[in-house]
Amino acid sequence: MSAFALRRLLPRHIRVLPAHPSAPVLSASHIHRWNLTAAPPSRARYSSATTSSSTTPPPGQDVEMAEPTGLIAKSGIELLTFGTPNGYKASIMLEELKDAYGKEYTTQTVNIMKNTQKEPWFTAVSPNGRIPAIVDHDRGGFAVFEGLSILLYLGRHYDPENRLSFPVDSDEYSEAEQWMAWQHGGVGPMQGQANHFFRFARDKPAYAVQRYVGETERLYGILDARLSGGRDYVVGGRFSVADIALLGWANVTTLAGLDLPKMFPNVQAWLDRCLARPAVKRGFEVPDGPSSMSNEAMAKAYETDPEKRKKADEAFRFLNECKEQYGYKYASP
């Protein structure tokens, strides 16, 4: 999904009110992040960096959300990210490493709707101007950009017992590389285009809608076959970086027009297993709380809000019309 599409959903300002002891507190940039389904929360906490606490502006003020202007950590891993499918690759991996080895890290929220990722200080870390990126202050400030590269880097340097990765001379290492490359070159780009044309584009050409949704279905059919026959995880019979690479995208398949439980039950069962992991749950809340675009959040919104249910039904009717217009028939691989 492009920053342009996301930007259309966000307000420029937010009023921060005093927190009520019994009210849930969400960080400010979460309030309308990918918000097709959820009504805006009435209260928010201001934060652009996450360490052990966050800062709150004076109650009742209208504030323009401050963005980071450079690196802030002096040691450890510093994560620069936002709540997107690719961003979750890094945050889930780091949360898993925290559980496995006690490794802490620092997070800064990089709001891609404000083009903070295009600032010179950020492109010095990530030349492509995209999140996520990390800086390893314990290795001379070494920077890594792209979610796939981050997963491999963290596995190589901070998973000495191969709890999440695999020994480099093993067949499982090669298998994991293959499935991660498949995700990086296929699932991410195709599903991102499906999100854009089906949900966010001002003009929704029928050919593009059925083309990208159809290709996303084809790819998830491959994953569903991989997870058949009692295979619980993508590689090696255990949770690994190969699963982490896919989770952020699999968790927003409703957005792309896929009915995961109906069409791909093996993928749904795998996703449920992964979501039951505490570190995965926490990773999906970095940097700014749960996304309103997850499959679960969208399903709940459709169940509780008749208007959203009506719009969802209209969207799926439109999708089916696009498929019929061009004679689309599901096939995989």
Image (tube, grey):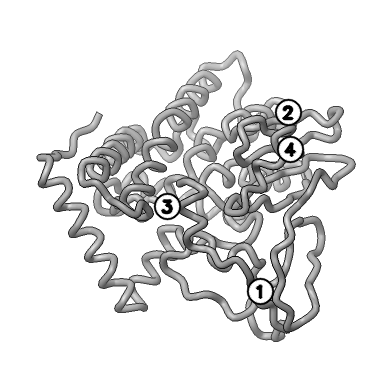
Q: Which residue: 37% across, 37% down?
A: 190
Write down the residue under mark 3. Answer: 252
Identify residue type, mark 2.
Pro
Q: Which residue: 64% across, 73% down?
A: 14
For label 1, the SS is: loop
Instruction: Name the mark nearer the viewer: 2 or 1.
Output: 1
For label 2, the SS is: loop
Q: Tell which circle, 4 or 1, labels the residue nearer the N-terminal end.
A: 1
Identify residue type, mark 4.
Pro
Q: Which percent across, then down, holds residue 229?
A: 31, 35
Q: Which mark is residue 160?
A: 2
Q: Is residue 64 left or right of residue 183?
A: right
For label 4, the SS is: helix
Q: Tell which circle, 3 or 4, labels the residue nearer the N-terminal end.
A: 4
Q: Tell which circle, 3 or 2, labels the residue nearer the N-terminal end.
A: 2
Figure check: 11 above or below 7: below
Q: So how many labels did they put on this image?
A: 4
Q: Which residue: 33% across, 72% down?
A: 308
Instruction: From the viewer's side, name the closer residue of 63 and 320.
Output: 63
Write down the residue under mark 1. Answer: 44
CB within 8 Å, label 2 to label 1: no
Whole-number angstrom distance, CA of label 3 to CA of label 4: 31 Å
